[in-house]
Image (spheres, grey):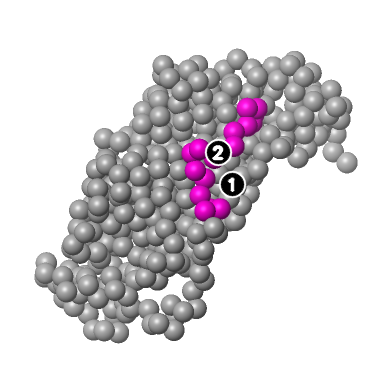
């Protein structure tokens, strides 16, 4: 047997090197709203009336864009892709299906979501603060029913999504505008002079027999996959530092258990996505103390102004406002703080389907122990005095 104390979830983990983020790397991983670059020819419906004014963005990974010229802010593999769709009032993203998870995060305006091969199986309205997880292998589309500044982030499962399959009517209408898809799922624009490959090298519409085999979802089933802003369940003590100075954020698990250390907290959506997602909410001055995790993480600000500091030695910091995002590398120490004047919300997306086990800075763990709290062997907050002696260091 080893003589090393069995101490869960604190520092002194020599087998996990500390990731140090340089100022240049911090800049590279910071994607501000002003850095987003739209592509209006990302998909085959880009000339279809009613869908021709979409703005498509790819911030982390290329997503499912079918345009060779799609701008991607950060191509580093994260285990997921993050993009966005913005469109004026009344503009529609046509029916298509995905091979991997697609999660809609509405931060501004409202969108009408519909699904089914012809879009008539059901529809639900997404408002600011709502998150919807759309099942794989069903057709879905959405229309901006709110103001022109509606904003819909998308989180897609896996590094390689496989692309998408368009509804048969979408492909047929696109042909009338000179647009086709190659067998590699790349856009072919005959109007711009692209040669048209033979039929065997082009994507053909799904047959009715193939469509009939797809699963159907009722509005009630789909509603269970929506974490509406008004229905969120918040933990007041999700982390070891929740009662300590510098802590205090609340957390709502949306997809997967993720990073919560509250043993009583459950997510709204359970099934594997390849990533998990949770809202963090903080009043001015509140945040999360020094910690790190092995999974990649992306922070997306919805409201307020947040400061993120990386590294315990030679720290580097960045301030983020609405729609700004930061990619935090694996095993990098970090703190988060609401430095604005009002309550702020941000979305934390982490890679993987399992729980995210946080490692706390030793000073944080000691302060928590002084306050009577520790982390048990299951990774959850527990009374420090009731932990086994091997897990009590102070």
Q: Which mark is residue 307?
A: none
| Left or right side of 208 for 368 | right
Residue numbers of the magenta segment: 223-239
Which image quarter is the C terminus in? top right
Residue 229 in magenta stretch: yes
Identity of the residue drawn at 60% across and 15% down: 245
- Which of the pair 364/90 is nearer the observer? 90
- From the viewer's perspective, is residue 49 above or below residue 107? below
Q: Secondary structure at mark 2?
A: loop
Which image quarter is the N terminus in?
Answer: top right
Q: Residue at x 34, y 69 (%)?
A: 166
- Residue under label 1: 268
In the image, residue 222 lies at what x, y percent?
Answer: 51, 57
Residue drawn at x 64%, y 17% as measured from the top left: 244
Give the prevailing secondary structure in the magenta stretch. loop
Kindly tell me whether residue 304 is visible in this rendering: yes
Q: Are marks 2 and 1 in contact (CB under 8 Å)?
A: yes
At numbered mark 1, what does the secondary structure look like: helix, strand or loop? loop
Relative image position of residue 289 (x, y in whole percent): 58, 23
Q: Relative to 72, is 244 on the left or the right?
A: right
Task: Bin the neighbour count of mark 2 within 10 Å (Cα to Cα): few under 14, some 14-19, many 20 and up.
Answer: some
Residue 200 locus on image (x, y percent): 30, 84
- Mark closest to the chain's N terminus, 2 or 1: 2
Q: CA distance from mark 2 to mark 1?
A: 8 Å
Pick whichever, 145 or 379, lies toward us: 145
Q: Which residue, given by chain and number where applicable, does mark 2 sit on? A: 232
166 within the magenta span? no
Q: Is residue 316 visible?
A: no
* Residue 83 in the figure: left or right of residue 239: left
**What residue do we see at 51% from left, 24% from top?**
282
């Amino acid at each position: 047997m080893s003589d090393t104390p069995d101490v869960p979830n604190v520092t002194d983990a020599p087998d996990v090197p500390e990731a140090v983020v340089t100022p240049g790397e911090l800049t590279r991983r910071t994607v501000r709203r002003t850095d987003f670059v739209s592509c209006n020819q990302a998909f085959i419906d880009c000339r279809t009336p009613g869908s021709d004014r979409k703005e498509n963005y790819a911030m982390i990974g290329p997503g499912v864009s079918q345009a060779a010229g799609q701008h991607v802010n950060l191509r580093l593999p994260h285990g997921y892709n993050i993009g966005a769709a913005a469109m004026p009032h009344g503009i529609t993203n046509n029916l298509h299906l995905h091979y991997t998870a697609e999660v809609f995060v509405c931060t501004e305006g409202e969108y009408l979501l519909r699904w089914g091969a012809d879009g008539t199986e059901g529809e639900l309205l997404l408002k600011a603060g709502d998150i919807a997880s759309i099942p794989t292998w069903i057709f879905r589309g959405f229309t901006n029913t709110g103001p022109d500044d509606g904003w819909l982030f998308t989180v897609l499962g896996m590094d390689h999504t496989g692309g998408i399959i368009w509804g048969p009517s979408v492909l047929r209408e696109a042909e009338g505008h000179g647009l086709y898809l190659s067998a590699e799922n790349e856009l072919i624009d005959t109007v711009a002079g692209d040669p048209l490959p033979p039929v065997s090298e082009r994507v053909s519409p799904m047959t009715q027999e193939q469509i009939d085999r797809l699963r159907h979802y009722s509005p009630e089933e789909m509603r269970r996959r929506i974490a509406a802003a008004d229905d969120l369940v918040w933990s007041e003590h999700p982390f070891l530092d929740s009662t300590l100075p510098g802590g205090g954020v609340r957390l709502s698990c949306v997809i997967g258990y993720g990073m919560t250390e509250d043993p009583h907290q459950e997510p709204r959506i359970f099934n594997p996505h390849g990533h998990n997602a949770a809202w963090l909410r903080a009043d001015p001055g509140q945040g999360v103390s020094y910690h790190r995790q092995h999974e990649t993480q992306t922070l997306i600000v919805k409201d307020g102004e947040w400061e993120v500091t990386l590294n315990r030695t030679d720290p580097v910091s960045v301030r983020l406002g609405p729609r700004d995002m930061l990619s935090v590398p694996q095993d990098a120490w970090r703190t988060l703080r609401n430095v604005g004047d009002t309550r702020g919300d941000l979305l934390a997306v982490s890679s993987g389907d399992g729980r995210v086990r946080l490692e706390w800075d030793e000073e944080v763990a000691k302060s928590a122990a002084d306050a009577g709290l520790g982390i048990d062997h299951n990774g959850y907050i527990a009374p420090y005095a009731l932990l086994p002696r091997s897990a009590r260091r102070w």
